[in-house]
Amino acid sequence: MLEENRGSYISGERIAAEASVSRAAVWKSIRALQGTGVPIDAVPNKGYALAADSDIVSETALRRILNGSDAPFRFDLHRSVSSTNELAKRAGDLGEAEGLVIVAEEQTAGKGRLNRRFHSPGGSGIYLSILLRPKIQAQDALMITTAAAVAAAEAIGEVTQRDARIKWVNDIFCHGGKCGGILTEASISMENGTIDYAVMGIGMNIREPEGGFPPEIRGIAAAILEPGVIIPDVRCRLIAAFLRRFWEIYRHLPEKHHLNGYRERSMLIGEQVMVISGNSERPAVVLGIDGDCRLVVRWEDGAEAALSTGEVSVRKTEGKYGID
Ligand code: BTN
């Protein structure tokens, strides 16, 4: 009720009557919500109001914003989890249908690619995973990551008007720093090489966390919104915009139409890079991204190569981009 009447007061009496509970029970619930950080104003003789600029991610708010979308999303919202990808994989193992979206306020063991940690503090970011059962071959699983990258960059533009670029293969960049990352994990059928289920997890730094980013990612990480900028309901709106756009791409995934949008937003094309493999480093220029999402580069001797993400990954090094 508070969500549907943001910014307006509703009396405890009315809430109690609609929920068929006592006013004392309403008060107790409100106290509990306030205790978890939900900005509810309580005024004697007026009632309770959820702050109009509240940035709480609730299922009601998500449904309201997603209204009209035919995407089969079911939400599972958590305050704190180890990793939304882990929860979604558990659901996949248990046979849960496609479309389950697990969202967390914070992750205590957020995972990035290559066993890296993904810093996931409460209140400042978006951390979510979608359980998918795509009808594609395992070798095309990267299409899910690239679809999510395009959807995220577009959603950031739509909701915040900030320019978001994609750094091959799974990073989202804003203001020259990494503001988001995608980790897709899949369970493969060994019999026919198809995907039993895939979990696409995405994390976005909306605001710089209190106390700043930890030293190990300072200088690499960035927030989408500058300090002090408030966009009401920004996390909910971003999640909804992302989900809507992701689903539009995902439903036509085998056609790979989104690869053009991926290339247009790609920040490496035309850039000089350093390709690092093991202990060796080799300069190259990035020519493009091919239909299998490999990075096409030209070495200094003029020879060309298509690098796949399994062999190399991209990281920013002292203002240049290296590939290790
Ligand atoms: C990366 O930058 O290497 C990928 C980061 C992916 C982070 C997201 S946050 C939601 C989901 N749960 C996780 O544990 N990881 C992904």
Image (cartoon, rainbow, N blue to C red):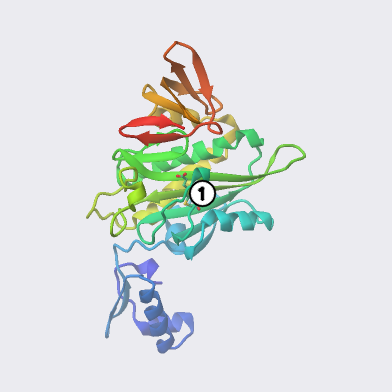
Rendered image quadrant of residue 33: bottom left
The residue drawn where x is 36% and y is 61% is: 123
Mark 1: few/some/many CA within 10 Å (<14, 14-19, 20+)? many
Q: Is residue 106 above or below residue 262?
A: below
Q: Is residue 8 left or right of residue 94?
A: left
Counting from the top left corner in percent of width and height, residue 19 is at 47, 80
Amino acid under disc 1: Gly
Q: Is residue 170 left or right of residue 220?
A: right
Q: Is residue 45 left or right of residue 200?
A: left
Rendered image quadrant of residue 54: bottom left
Q: Determine if residue 266 is in view.
A: no
Ligand 1 within 8 Å, label 1 CB: yes
Q: Determine if residue 54 is in view.
A: yes
Q: Disc 1 designates what residue? A: 201
* In the foreground, 109 or 68: 109
Counting from the top left corner in percent of width and height, residue 190 is at 74, 41
The residue drawn where x is 35% and y is 70% is: 37
* In the foreground, 80 or 113: 113
Q: Is residue 48 above or below residue 316?
A: below
Counting from the top left corner in percent of width and height, residue 35 is at 37, 76
Q: Check disc 1 and report its element: helix, strand or loop.
A: strand
Q: Across the whole image, how many numbered discs are drawn on residues?
A: 1
The residue drawn where x is 50% and y is 51% is: 111
In the image as oriented, which residue stretches furthest toward the front? 279
In the image as oriented, which residue stretches furthest toward the left? 228
In the image as oriented, which residue stretches furthest toward the right? 191
